[in-house]
């Protein structure tokens, strides 16, 4: 075992670090990923507030994972296309547009999944009423929206 490369377990663990670095870079560079992460946070919070069962939460986690994963892949495609085709080219544009289209399709499907999971009118009304009539909850909701806006728009695009 070489000190420089480490054993297979060390290399395996390092791969998680590389993945985390890729996610960190994408969060820093891509506003759309920050939008999706913010939406995911609100969706998970709403699922918790609505008391979704395990199967519905599993579907919610899967849906969020697909959208976030496709956004990461889209960012990788965009970076690779920019590397190999720095000048505008119709095929480069097509590759970027197709990857963005995949994200858009998954996001649209996620909205439909969210509607089907969260459409519990009496519970939604109770949550809305609690937020609107309780100053503490109203303040927390307002602060959450401000923090979300800061998270999404604080880092300039590329």
Image (cartoon, grey):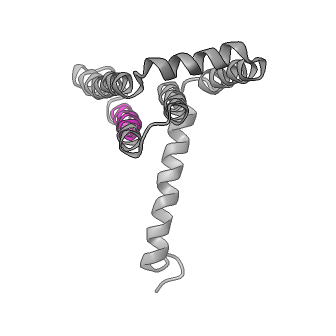
Compared with 6, 145 (above or below) is: above
Compared with 48, 155 (above or below) is: above
Magenta residues (range): 63-83
- The front one of 27 and 131 is 131
Give the residue at x 45% y 62%.
Answer: 15
Indicate yes or no whether the magenta region holds residue 77.
yes
Count of numbered circles in the view: 0
Check the picture and name the quadrant holding the C terminus.
Answer: top right
Residue 150, by quadrant, is top right
Q: Position of residue 88 (x, y in %)?
A: 32, 20
Residue 74, by quadrant, is top left
Q: Where is residue 29 in the image (x, y as percent from the top left)?
A: 54, 32
- The front one of 107 and 78 is 107
Magenta stretch secondary structure, dominant: helix
Indicate yes or no whether the magenta region holds residue 153.
no
Residue that extends furthest to the front in the rendered view of this protein: 122
Q: In this view, does 4 lie to the left or right of 97?
A: right
Q: Where is residue 8 in the image (x, y as percent from the top left)?
A: 42, 77
- The front one of 29 and 20 is 20
- The front one of 81 and 64 is 64
Residue 11, by quadrant, is bottom left
Q: In this view, does 58 lie to the left or right of 4?
A: left
Give the residue at x 75% y 19%.
Answer: 139
């Amino acid at each position: 075992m070489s000190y420089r490369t480490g054993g297979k377990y060390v290399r395996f663990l390092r791969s998680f670090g590389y993945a985390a670095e890729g996610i960190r870079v994408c969060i820093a560079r891509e506003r759309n990923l920050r939008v999706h992460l913010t939406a995911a946070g609100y969706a998970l919070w709403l699922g918790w507030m609505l008391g979704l069962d395990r199967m519905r939460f599993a579907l919610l986690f899967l849906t969020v994972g697909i959208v976030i994963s496709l956004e990461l892949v889209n960012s990788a495609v965009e970076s690779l296309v920019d590397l190999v085709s720095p000048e505008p080219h119709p095929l480069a544009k097509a590759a970027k547009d197709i990857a963005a289209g995949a994200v858009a399709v998954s996001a649209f499907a996620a909205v439909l999944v969210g509607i089907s999971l969260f459409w519990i009118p009496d519970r939604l009304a109770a949550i809305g009423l609690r937020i609107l009539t309780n100053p503490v909850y109203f303040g927390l909701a307002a602060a959450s929206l401000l923090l979300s806006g800061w998270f999404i728009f604080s880092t300039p695009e590329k």
